[in-house]
Image (cartoon, rainbow, N blue to C red):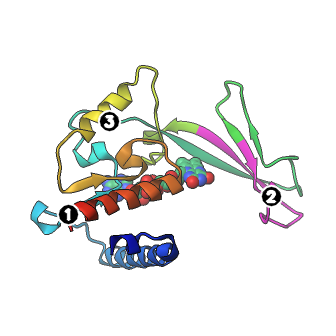
Amino acid sequence: MINDLFTKSNFIEQEKLCFSLFNITFSILSSLNTIFLLKDEDYYHIFNSMPIDEYYNFKFGELNYRSIKFHNIDIPAPKLLPTATVNFTNSGIYTRMTEWKNLPFHGSNNDYTTITFEEPCSYKENNFERYYPVKDLKGENRLLFMKYKKIKNSKIDFVGRLGLYSYLNMDQCINFALKTSENFIRKNI
Ligand SMILES: Cc1cc2nc3c(=O)[nH]c(=O)nc-3n(C[C@H](O)[C@H](O)[C@H](O)COP(=O)(O)OP(=O)(O)OC[C@H]3O[C@@H](n4cnc5c(N)ncnc54)[C@H](O)[C@@H]3O)c2cc1C
């Protein structure tokens, strides 16, 4: 049965089911406008993708994250750049600029073009949007994460970029979460 659940052929169906469940849960939570506090005995197991340090009330200290402020500018011209993205290698405040019209199927009007400049910043300067775990030279952030990871907690598996404090693409996050839940089901159900 476990194998059936995770075969490629029904992956799309699982995906649809996950999205439906997410949408239903989200609609319920947002319409109730209520924060739910779960007690240990209220749930069997949680796969948690929130920041691991925040879950443990930052008891060993805060993990650091880099964020990005996106500055969008509309320019009254059909097109500006010969390419989609220009990376800046100087010490200015922006790391890159993107002209969306240069991506396939993005924008078709001749009056304006939109350019986005990216300015790196601390997540605290950007509404606590945690984008990239910070890899410091001494590896101190990784060590701090390991302290949280080593906390024994049989009712929670941390997943996702914030739970694992690791830069992961979407496919990696989804694969890891599926594998983690598959292992849990195999061992416990
Ligand atoms: C600028 C940028 C570009 C990217 N481009 C790509 C790309 O081209 N391709 C690609 O594959 N990946 C890309 N990624 C990576 C991709 O966004 C991540 O892999 C993916 O979003 C991670 O999924 P996640 O569920 O782990 O975390 P998230 O998508 O970050 O979800 C975590 C969720 O937890 C919520 N949360 C936070 N704190 C709490 C709390 N205390 N309680 C409850 N909920 C909380 C957050 O609001 C958020 O909704 C990009 C990322 C960034 C930042």
Q: From mark 3 to mark 2, how far is it between C-alphas?
A: 40 Å
Q: Which residue is denoted by mark 1 in the rendering?
A: 188
Looking at the rendered structure, the secondary structure element under dot 2 is: helix
Question: Observer-nearest residue: 51 or 188?
Answer: 188
Q: Amino acid at mark 2?
A: Lys
Q: Is residue 129 above or below residue 107?
A: above
Q: Position of residue 143 (x, y in %)?
A: 32, 29
> Residue 101, which numbered label?
2
Q: Return the disc, 2 or 1, that comes first in the chain's sequence.
A: 2
Q: Closer to the camera: disc 2 or disc 1?
A: 1
Is 115 included in the stretch rendered in magenta?
yes
Name the side, left or right, on which 46 lies relative to 75.
left
Looking at the rendered structure, the secondary structure element under dot 3 is: helix
Q: Which residues are magenta?
A: 97-119
Is 37 included in the stretch rendered in magenta?
no
Q: Residue at x 48, y 45 (%)?
A: 126
Circle 1 residues within 10 Å: few <14, some 14–19, many ≥20 = few
Q: Residue at x 45, y 25 (%)?
A: 136
The image quadrant of residue 43 is: bottom left
* Residue sitting at the far top: 138
Q: Position of residue 150 (x, y in %)?
A: 23, 38
Quadrant for the N terminus in the image: bottom left
Q: From mark 2 to mark 1, how far is it between C-alphas?
A: 50 Å
Mark 2 C-beta closer than 8 Å to ligand 1: no
Q: Which residue is denoted by mark 3 in the rendering?
A: 145
Q: Amino acid at mark 3?
A: Phe
Question: Observer-nearest residue: 16 or 126?
Answer: 16
Looking at the rendered structure, the secondary structure element under dot 1 is: helix
Name the side, left or right, on which 77 lies relative to 90.
right
Q: Residue at x 21, y 68 (%)?
A: 189
Q: Return the disc, 3 or 2, that comes first in the chain's sequence.
A: 2
Q: Is residue 134 above or below residue 113?
A: above
